[in-house]
Image (spheres, rainbow, N blue to C red):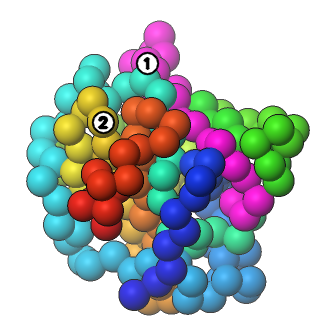
Amino acid sequence: KGSFVILSCPVKVMVYSAWLSLLTAALFHGGNGAKCPDDPPGSCSNLDFDRYKGRWYQQVDSKAFFFGSGLQCVTANYSMNSDGTIKVFNTGNKGSPAGSLSTAEGTATVGDASKCELKVSFSRFQPFPSPYRVLETDYTTYAIVASCLSVVNFLDLSALWVLSRTPRMDANQLKSLL
C-alpha cells in the first residue's frame, strides 16, 4: 500500500515542522504515503549510533510529505552535539542535481535504543518530535527507516525510506530490500 519513488539521483524528504508537514500532507497528498503497522517489523535492535552516524543518501522515498517533492541528490548527515543530542543535517538540490541547495538542520534524541528509535525535531515550533525508526541496517551499506505518525497513519501518511552509504546503491541490493 502506498507509492514509492526510486530515483536516479536520491531524494530526501526534508522536515521543517511536524504540524506543517502533517497538515500539508493531509490536504494535498492524502493517501500517497505509506501506512505503518502498529509495531513495524525490523531486525534492528539496540541501535549503535556510533556506527549509524555519518552521511546517508536516500534511494527510495514513500513521498508521504508534499513539501519534499522536487528535491534531488539529498543526503542526511548524523553527528553528535556537545550536549549529547544528535545533529541532523539534510541537504538536497531543488529541481535537478545542479539546482540550488536546500538545507534543513534538526536535533534528535534517542527515543528507545532497543527499538532503534530516534525522536527528531526540525523546528522549535514543532509541537512534538517526529518518530524516526531504523527498521533494518547493516550500518555500512543500507538502512530502512520509517517515520510512523500514529495521528495520520490512518490516512496512509507515514514515511518510509531506503538509505545508502553511497550516492547510488547497487541495483540488485536495492531490489532485494524492496
Residue 80's disc is 1
Q: Residue 104 carries which label?
A: none
Q: Residue at x 26, y 24 (%)?
A: 51
Q: Give the range drawn in magenta.
A: 68-87
For disc 2, the neighbor class at 10 Å (few under 14, some 14 to 19, many from 20) is: some
In the rendered image, the vertical position of residue 39 relative to residue 172, given as above or below: below
Nearest to the observer: residue 145 or residue 125: 145
Indicate the position of residue 123 as horizontal and vertical percent values.
68, 44
| Main SS category, magenta section | strand
On the picture, is 33 further left or further right than 72?
left
The residue under the point 43% across, 64% down is 160
The residue at the point 50 percent across, 73 percent down is: 4
Q: Relative to the observer, which residue lies in front, 93 or 88?
A: 93
Q: In this view, does 159 lie to the left or right of 141?
A: right
SS category of the residue bearing label 1: strand
Give the structural element (helix, strand or loop) at label 2: loop
Q: Please say whether residue 111 is visible from this viewpoint.
A: no
Q: Which of the 4 quarters of the picture holds residue 137?
A: top left
Q: In which quarter of the image is the N terminus?
A: bottom left
The residue beneath circle 2 is: 141
Question: Which residue lies most toward the top here?
Answer: 82
Q: What's the residue at 25%, 33% (across, down)?
A: 139
- Quick check: is 88 in the magenta stretch? no
Q: Is residue 118 above or below residue 64?
A: above
Local crowd size for mark 1, using a 10 Å CA cut-off: few (<14), some (14–19), many (≥20): some
x then y, percent, for residue 170: 37, 45
